Amino acid sequence: MSTTQVTHLIRSASLTGFADLAQSAGLDPLAMMRKAGLPRRCLDDSEALIGMEAVCRLLNHCAQASDMEAFGLRLASRRHIWELGPVSLVIKQENTALSAIKTLLSYNRVLSDALLARVDEEDEVVVIREELILGKSVPTRQAMELTVGVMFQVLRDLLGPRWEPRQVCFTHRPPADLTFHRSFLGKRIEFNSAFNGIVCAASDMARELTSTQAGLGSFARRFMDSALNQRKLGCKETVRHLIAALLGSGRCTVDKVAQHLGVSRQTLHRQLTLEGEQFKTVLNSVRRERALKLRDDSDHSLEDAALMLGFSSASAFAHWFQASFGTSFIQSRRERQRETKEQVHVTADQ
């Protein structure tokens, strides 16, 4: 098995407004960044690439230290479409919000290669699904709310300040205080959901947009295409993304992944072997990451978790979890919750 760890990158623009928000929460922004392993200079260069894992740690540390459960979402509320960089010029050339979002997601790897996102058109709604695929056990709740919140802001910038989604969904459990979530996202929020993302009315997403700056848009598209070509994923990371996308469908097999890649099963095995990997180990890696998120951040039942992780039954998932972590899913969750409460008490005493 390969021991190589992939560092996932995101633009420093993801921290736009961070210093002001941290200060308003009574924190020293530079001290919090040093603790997370982020350099001071990334606040000055929005195009610099920084580690997504470090950003997850930063947001989590800030939420805990400030007792501000909506820290990531509050940071998202300070973001706007133009802070996406050159891609904002590209998507502003599209005719509808739907095509704009599809174009935005096509350049995902340039903005953040840890984000798996897709658009599903289902009858009268359009569902934008987002998931962070890191391959490491790092807290992602705050980063996930930042991610979904930024998408919400992009849609607001495209469709106008009065636009409302059908629903905003998070796989994690609700915070103790929903005040900010409701004031920013509206009242149609679902926690402990089957996915992270936003459900929109198809009629809203089909609304015609006003295109601007055609010349700059063409230049920006060439720039983004060039950047995209330089950020191609290796076979292992490509397979990880496909597994994550297919996991809850019950069709996540080596044959199905190979089919999506347009190669034979044998070719896929050969390409993974060249990177020191096997399909089963990559599949288990994605499942372990997802399982720990469901354990730590959600109230999903054993049965729901089994479905979301692509197991045929709750008993099959329970057996896999016991073999993987040496304890049961339910017992592990209880122990984790007890540890979290103890940490909170220690922090309060300090």
Image (cartoon, rainbow, N blue to C red):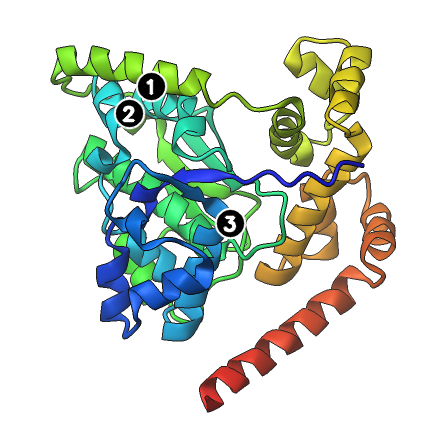
The amino acid at mark 1 is Met
CA–CA distance between discs 3 and 1?
24 Å
In this picture, residue 284 sits left or right of residue 154: right
Q: Secondary structure at mark 1?
A: helix
Q: Mark 2 highlights which residue?
A: 87
Residue 200, percent from left and from top = 36, 34
> For the point 74% across and 46% down, which residue is it?
306
> For the point 31% across and 63% down, which residue is it?
30
Q: Closer to the camera, 171 or 61?
A: 61
Q: Closer to the camera, 327 or 347?
A: 347
Residue 43, percent from left and from top = 27, 50
Of mark 3 and mark 1, the one earlier in the sequence is 3
The single residue placed furthest to the bottom in the displayed view is 349
**Res. 67 in view:** no
In the image, residue 225 above or below residue 28? above
Of circles 2 and 1, which is in front?
1
Q: Secondary structure at mark 3?
A: helix
Check residue 224 in the rendering and tell me which mark sits there, or answer none. 1
Check residue 53 in the rendering and tell me which mark sits there, or answer none. 3
The amino acid at mark 3 is Glu
> For the point 55% across and 40% down, which residue is it?
7
Residue 2, percent from left and from top = 76, 36
